[in-house]
Image: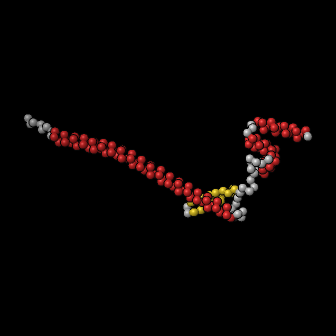
Amino acid sequence: MAKAKLPDLSAFQEHQSSRLALAAVLIFLLIVSAVTSTFALTAWTRLKIASNEAESERLGLLAEGLTNVLAARLSSAGPDIGLPLNFEPVSCVAGGLTVVTRLQGHSDLIDLDAADHNLLAQGFASLGVDPDMSNWLAIAVEYSRSGASIFAAAGSAGRRRLQAGIA
């Protein structure tokens, strides 16, 4: 009988050791990429945050500068400046940036802290509020600036109505 030839074990052991080496290298690369990707992601995030803050600061300074220019123009031009002072939006386009602002003239405003009842009621009526509600709102403003409660305002309004009906 012929003897059966045994397989060469050294080739098998070499193949198995190269598999282990490949697995070790892949695990090492996985660990290194996990560590470096964390640092890269953190650096990218910080870069985006810093650039966003810089852009926000730049736009804030631009808005402040435009506000100063507008205030200087308003104070030096007098009443006839050519801009609507009724809180309509006014826009300015500079490059790809549009700045929208609203101007309010203060000459016709009512001072809520100093106006009497009749002026307050007239002011609320000019906003389109019905006369009865204008009277109630004027009373509420008077009591809010005096520190009294709104319940006292309602009682006082009832007394005023009774006195007006009797007289």
Q: Is residue 128 visible?
A: no
Quadrant for residue 22, please give it. Answer: top left
Tell me the residue at 66%/56% (across/down): 102
Question: Closer to the camera, 10 or 98?
Answer: 98
Image colouring = secondary structure
Question: Closer to the camera, 105 or 35?
Answer: 105
Say whether residue 110 is left or right of residue 95.
Answer: right
Name the spot of residue 96 as percent of width and height, x first.
Answer: 55, 61
Q: Quadrant of the N terminus?
A: top left
Tell me the residue at 64%/60% (across/down): 71
Quadrant for residue 9, please give it. Answer: top left
Name the spot of residue 106 as percent of width and height, x first.
Answer: 72, 55
Tell me the residue at 65%/63% (across/down): 73
Question: Closer to the camera, 130 or 54?
Answer: 54
Name the spot of residue 79 as percent of width and height, x first.
Answer: 72, 62
Question: How many numbered marks are there?
Answer: 0
Question: Closer to the camera, 139 or 36?
Answer: 139
**Most extreme residue toward the left, as rendered?**
1
Tell me the residue at 44%/52% (across/down): 47
Say whether residue 7 is left or right of residue 166.
Answer: left
Q: Quadrant of the C terminus?
A: top right
Say whether residue 23 is left or right of residue 74.
Answer: left
Name the spot of residue 75 as percent of width and height, x first.
Answer: 67, 61
Q: Is residue 58 visible?
A: yes
